[in-house]
C-alpha cells in the first residue's frame, strides 16, 4: 500500500516509517520539521536502502497539503503531525487547538474528498487524566488535565462522530503510553530541541555530560519508592503496533481504539537504576517539586491490542535503556551534521 505519514520525520514517525518499508509498504512523508530534522530522511534511506518520497509541507497549510492528495496515489494515512508538550499547551492553548484539532479536521476533509478511507491516528494516554484504575483499559473514564490532552480527546471524539456519519471509513486510534528507546542501528532516536521534557532523553543527556543532573519531579507519591510510575514502551514495539493497526483497517470499518503499552509500570528511579546498569554510568539527580498535572501511577491494559491486532510489546526495560544510550552515544549532539559518517557507527556490543 501507499501510506501517507504525517509527522513522519519525528521521533515516533521515523521508527514507524522503517517498519512500514520493511514490511513492503511505500511511504510518503509530510513534515514541517517543527519537531524533527532533515537529517532523519537521510538516515531512513541509509537504514532501509530505499529512496523515500518526502515533502516539506505544513499540514495546516491546506492549499499546499491538498497537492499531496492531488499528486500521489494514497491508500491510507498514519497521522502523527501535531504539537505534544504539556507545558507548552498550558501556555499556548490556541496553538494546540489549531495544530492538533483544526488541522486534523482539515486532513480528514481532504481524505474524504479524495476517497482515502483508512486512517491510523496517534492519540495518547493523557486522555485518561488521573486514572481511576491500573492497568487502564480502553473503556476507562476519559478526563483530561491540560490542553494537549484535551485536544487529543477532542480529535478522538471528532473521529468517532465522523465515522458514525460516514460508514466507508475505517479508523483506528492508538493511545500511546510512554515511548522510549531508539532503533538498534543507533542512527535514529529522540532528539529534543531544548532541555528534554521526557525522562529518557534527559537521562541520556546527563550520561553524556550535556546536562549536569536529572531533575526528578516528586518523590512523595504513593509508590514503591515515591517516584511516579509509567508504562514505558520501546519505540520500535510502538512502531510495529502501527503496522498491525494498518493491516487491520482492511478488515473492519468504523472507529476502534487501542492502548499501546507493555502493561507494566516502572518508577522513575527504576528507570534510572536500569540505565545505570546497562551503561555503567552513574546518573546524578535532584528531587524537585511535583509538576502540575503529573499523576502518580499510569500503565496500560494492552489486552485488546493483543486479542484484536495480534500485537504485544516484546522489548524489555533493559532493551529500551540500552538502545536509547546507543543512540545518544553515537549522536551526542542529536542530528547535527557530523555525528555519524557512513561506516563509522559505534555499536555498543559490550553493554
Image (spheres, grey):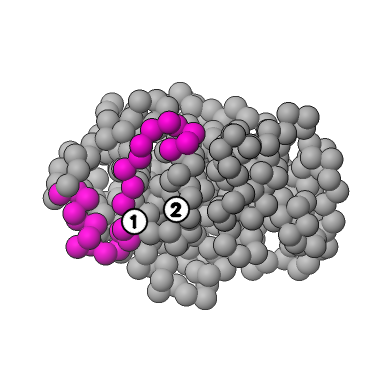
Q: Nearer the viewer, residue 351 or 247?
A: 351
Secondary structure state at the residue bearing disc 2:
loop
Q: Determine whether 319 is above or below 121 in the image.
A: above
Say if mark 1 contacts mark 2, CB within 8 Å. Answer: yes
Question: In the figure, is residue 98 to the left or right of 11?
Answer: left
Q: Could you tell me residue 19's position as x and y percent?
A: 45, 32
| Residue count near mark 2 (Cα–Cα under 10 Å), binned few <14, some 14–19, many ≥20 | some
Report the side of 226 relative to 35 (left or right): right
Check disc 2 and report the residue beneath it.
Answer: 38
Mark 1 Cα-neighbour bin, 10 Å: few <14, some 14–19, many ≥20: few
Question: Residue at (40%, 51%) from the top-left corner?
Answer: 7
Q: Which residues are magenta?
A: 45-70
Write the residue at 75% across / 61% down.
211
Which numbered marker is on residue 56? 1
* Near-viewer residue (325 or 301): 325
* Residue 351 occupies quadrant: top right
Amino acid at each position: 500500500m501507499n501510506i501517507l505519514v504525517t509527522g513522519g520525520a519525528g521521533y515516533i514517525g521515523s521508527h514507524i516509517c522503517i517498519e512500514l518499508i520493511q514490511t513492503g509498504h511505500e511511504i510518503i512523508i509530510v513534515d514541517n520539521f517543527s519537531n524533527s530534522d532533515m537529517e532523519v530522511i537521510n538516515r531512513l534511506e541509509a537504514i532501509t536502502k530505499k529512496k523515500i518520497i518526502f515533502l516539506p509541507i505544513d499540514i495546516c497549510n491546506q492549499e499546499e497539503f491538498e497537492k499531496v492528495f492531488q499528486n500521489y496515489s494514497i491508500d491510507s494515512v498514519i497521522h502523527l503531525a501535531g504539537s505534544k508538550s504539556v507545558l507548552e499547551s498550558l501556555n499556548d492553548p490556541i496553538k494546540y487547538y489549531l495544530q492538533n484539532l483544526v488541522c486534523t479536521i482539515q486532513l480528514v476533509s481532504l481524505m474524504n474528498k479524495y476517497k482515502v478511507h483508512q486512517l491510523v491516528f496517534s492519540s495518547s494516554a493523557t486522555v485518561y487524566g488521573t486514572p481511576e484504575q491500573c492497568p487502564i483499559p480502553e473503556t476507562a473514564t476519559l478526563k483530561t488535565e491540560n490542553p494537549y490532552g484535551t485536544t487529543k480527546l477532542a480529535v478522538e471524539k471528532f473521529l468517532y462522530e465522523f465515522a458514525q456519519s460516514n460508514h466507508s471509513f475505517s479508523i483506528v486510534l492508538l493511545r500511546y503510553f510512554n515511548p522510549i528507546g531508539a532503533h538498534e542501528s543507533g542512527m535514529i532516536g529522540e532528539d529534543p530541541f531544548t532541555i528534554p521534557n521526557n525522562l529518557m532523553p534527559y537521562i541520556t543527556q546527563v550520561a553524556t555530560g550535556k546536562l549536569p543532573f536529572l531533575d526528578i519531579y516528586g518523590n512523595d507519591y504513593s509508590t514503591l519508592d515515591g517516584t511516579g510510575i509509567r508504562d514505558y514502551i520501546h519505540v520500535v514495539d510502538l512502531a510495529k503496533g502501527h503496522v498491525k493497526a494498518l493491516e487491520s483497517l482492511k478488515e473492519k470499518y468504523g472507529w476502534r481504539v487501542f492502548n499501546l503499552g507493555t502493561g507494566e509500570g516502572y518508577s522513575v528511579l527504576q528507570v534510572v537504576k536500569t540505565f545505570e546498569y546497562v551503561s555503567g554510568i552513574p546518573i546524578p539527580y535532584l528531587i524537585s517539586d511535583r509538576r502540575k498535572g503529573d499523576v502518580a501511577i499510569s500503565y496500560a491494559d494492552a489486552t485488546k491490542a493483543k486479542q484484536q491486532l495480534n500485537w504485544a510489546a516484546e522489548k524489555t526495560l533493559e532493551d529500551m535503556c540500552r538502545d536509547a544510550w546507543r543512540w545518544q552515544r553515537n549522536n551526542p549532539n542529536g542530528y547535527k551534521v557530523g555525528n555519524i559518517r557512513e561506516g563509522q557507527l559505534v555499536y555498543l556490543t559490550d553493554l
